[in-house]
Image: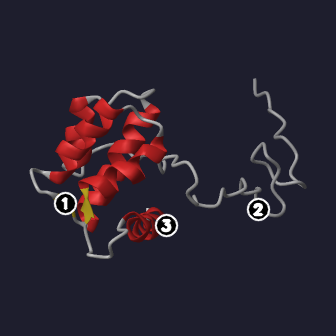
């Protein structure tokens, strides 16, 4: 999550073209269009994240990015119940949004099992237990 926050801070600086510390509507349209979402969904995202303000703060921008991700994982639809949960900080863990032409977090390779362990959870030298039969 901290890595996502750092990424969103970088993206905020890119989206803030006039360097005033906020994202105005025209800056948001240009940046959020990279998501591939349609204009109606982007309008919903703006309304929810801006809260009636003319510009997005950095925190509002991060909330908007989470809503973009939510819409992307829901095939371009923004489910309002989940969107409200995201805005309240209660929503699901979401991947970073896919933004055309933007740097993303490096993909982490799968972590191999610790030395001496097989993928089946047994140590390499252990033998399966032999059941004992008692009469």
Mark closest to the chain's N terminus, 2 or 1: 1
Secondary structure of the residue carrying numbered label 2: loop
Specify the farthest residue to the left. Answer: 52
Q: Of the residues tagged 3 and 2, which is closer to the observer?
A: 3
Cα distance, mark 2 to mark 1?
49 Å
Q: Residue at point 37% right, 68% down? A: 17
x, y (%) of residue 63? Answer: 28, 54
Q: Which residue is mark 1?
A: 55
User: For the residue labelled by badge 3, is the local secondary structure a helix, a strand or a loop?
Assistant: helix
Circle 3 packing at 10 Å, graded few (<14), some (14-19), many (20+), is few
Q: Would you name the residue on which mark 3 appears?
A: 3
Taking 32 as reference, is 132 above or below it?
above
Label tally = 3
- Verify CB contact (< 8 Å) between mark 3 and mark 2: no
Between the C-alphas of marks 3 and 2, the distance is 25 Å
| Location of residue 68 by image quarter | top left
> Is the C-beta separation of discs 3 and 1 under 8 Å?
no
The x and y percentages for residue 30 are 39, 51
Q: Quadrant of residue 58?
A: bottom left
* Quarter of the figure that contains the N terminus: bottom left
Local secondary structure at mark 1: strand
Q: Residue at x 25, y 38 (%)?
A: 43
Is 53 drawn above or below residue 94 in the view shown? below
* Residue that numbered label 2 is attached to: 114
What coloring was used for the rendering? secondary structure
Return the x and y of residue 90 as percentages of the image width and height: 24, 47
Above or below, 76 relative to 127 = above
Position of residue 70 measured from the top left corner of the image (x, y, whole percent): 38, 39
């Amino acid at each position: 999550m901290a890595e996502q926050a750092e990424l969103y801070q970088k993206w905020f600086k890119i989206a803030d073209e006039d360097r005033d510390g906020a994202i105005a509507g025209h800056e948001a349209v240009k940046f959020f269009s990279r998501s591939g979402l349609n204009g109606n969904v982007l309008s919903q995202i703006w309304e929810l994240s801006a809260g009636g303000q003319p510009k997005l703060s950095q925190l509002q921008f991060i909330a908007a990015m989470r809503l973009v991700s939510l819409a992307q994982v829901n095939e371009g639809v923004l489910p309002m119940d989940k969107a409200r949960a995201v805005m309240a900080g209660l929503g699901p863990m979401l991947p970073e949004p896919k933004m055309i032409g933007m740097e993303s977090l490096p993909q982490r390779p799968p972590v191999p099992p610790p030395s001496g362990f097989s993928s089946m959870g047994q140590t390499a030298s252990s033998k399966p237990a032999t059941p004992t039969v008692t009469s």
